[in-house]
Image (spheres, grey):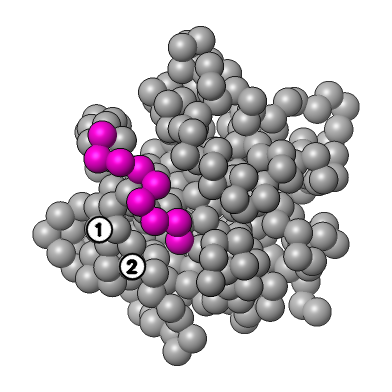
């Protein structure tokens, strides 16, 4: 199955050998520098994820956003007007627990959430070969279009991130899960509505990935959704982006870092209230 049909049917797809060795060496170096700045408190607060480092704080990531191979992927997947909202370095240390099961869509009050329309996708770039033993992605295929019991669970909580109860069912394996092993340089694209998580990292080295959030057909979204996307891009009121003394956004990047990627930046909508946060769908 090619990428677009798989994305439509299963809610995710793998595109192989997107980044070359030069790209990967550069990304490993940049992420390594950023992760050196992560505090012990941040690690403890995000024990399940490992880290949630905003790439907006590192202008060098403009080179990744503007990478021509990403543009080729978007063309292949028929993303006609993609806009970027946020991105994270997510690094699971050795011997760290599973990432809890969750989905990431926040606009379930919109009727389009229950259609084939993909309002938001993740683009995951793993910096090393990744299997179940070191924390690869696991998914419930098709859950982007068929509601699962886990859609009705509030997974975006401090308790789950801290793994205060390691026996919580959201850390357990599920009978319908599928592991998504991947090679360094491959890219995974997935619908934000997809139920997904990650295996524990049982090995002796960090497992690091970059997650970029895009909105494939931005112009087809309601003004309220577009306004919320702009707020996320501007780091305003985002629950996974704790308050900091100074919040940098890609608009603050030097010109040389913005050139080649600023066409992905959403514009701020004046006078349009952002869509309220709605992370859990109503039962159908």
- Which residue is more in the foreground, 251 or 259? 259
Q: Position of residue 151 (x, y in %)?
A: 63, 72
Secondary structure type for disc 2: loop
Quadrant in the rendering for residue 178: bottom left
Residue 131 placement (x, y as % from top left): 27, 68
| Residue 148 on the magenta segment | no
Query: Is residue 199 placed above or below 23 in the rendered structure?
Result: below
Task: Residue at the far right: name it.
Answer: 271
For the point 38% across and 74% down, the residue is 179
Foreground: 222 or 10? 10
Q: Of the numbered discs in the image, which one, if any, rests on residue 129?
A: 1
Dot 1 lies on which element?
Answer: loop
Residue placed furthest toward the bottom: 175
Residue 188 in view: yes
Q: Which residue is mark 2?
A: 181
Q: Position of residue 124 (x, y in %)?
A: 44, 51
At a point 44% along the width and 67% down the height, the residue shown is 197
Relative vertical location of residue 259 with respect to residue 1 in this rendering, above or below: above
Viewer-side residue, 209 vs 248: 209
In the depicted structure, whether residue 198 falls above or below residue 259: below
Q: Residues within 10 Å of mark 2 (few under 14, many from 20)?
A: some
Say which quadrant the C terminus sits in: bottom right
In the shown orientation, is residue 169 left or right of residue 252?
left
Determine the residue positioned at 60% across, 36% down: 84
Q: Are the residues flagged by discs 1 and 2 in contact, CB closer than 8 Å?
A: yes
Can residue 239 be seen in the rendering of this structure?
Answer: no
For the residues labelled 1 and 2, the Cα–Cα distance comes to 8 Å
- Residue 21 drawn in magenta: yes
User: Which residues make up the magenta segment?
Assistant: 14-22
């Amino acid at each position: 199955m090619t990428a677009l049909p798989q994305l439509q049917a299963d809610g995710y797809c793998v595109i192989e050998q997107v980044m070359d060795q030069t790209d990967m060496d550069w990304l490993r170096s940049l992420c390594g520098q950023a992760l050196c700045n992560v505090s012990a408190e941040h690690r403890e607060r995000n024990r399940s994820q490992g880290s949630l480092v905003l790439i907006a704080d590192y202008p060098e990531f403009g080179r990744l956003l503007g990478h021509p191979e990403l543009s080729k992927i978007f063309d292949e997947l028929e993303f006609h007007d993609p806009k970027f909202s946020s991105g994270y370095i997510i690094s699971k240390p050795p011997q760290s627990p599973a990432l809890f099961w969750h989905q990431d869509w926040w606009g379930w009050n919109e009727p389009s959430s229950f259609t084939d329309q993909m309002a938001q996708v993740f683009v995951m770039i793993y910096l090393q070969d990744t299997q179940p033993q070191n924390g690869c992605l696991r998914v419930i295929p098709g859950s982007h279009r068929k509601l699962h019991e886990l859609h009705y669970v509030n997974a975006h909580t401090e308790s789950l991130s801290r793994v205060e109860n390691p026996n919580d069912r959201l850390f357990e394996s599920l009978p319908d899960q599928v592991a998504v092993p991947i090679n360094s340089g491959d890219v995974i694209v997935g619908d934000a509505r997809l139920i997904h998580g990650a295996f524990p990292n049982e090995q002796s080295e960090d497992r690091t990935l970059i997650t970029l959030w895009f909105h494939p057909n931005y112009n087809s979204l309601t003004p309220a959704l577009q306004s919320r996307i702009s707020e996320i891009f501007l780091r305003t009121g985002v629950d996974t982006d704790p308050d900091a003394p100074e919040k940098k956004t890609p608009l603050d990047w030097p010109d040389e870092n913005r050139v080649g990627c600023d066409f992905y930046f959403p514009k701020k909508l004046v006078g349009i209230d952002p869509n309220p946060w709605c992370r859990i769908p109503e039962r159908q």
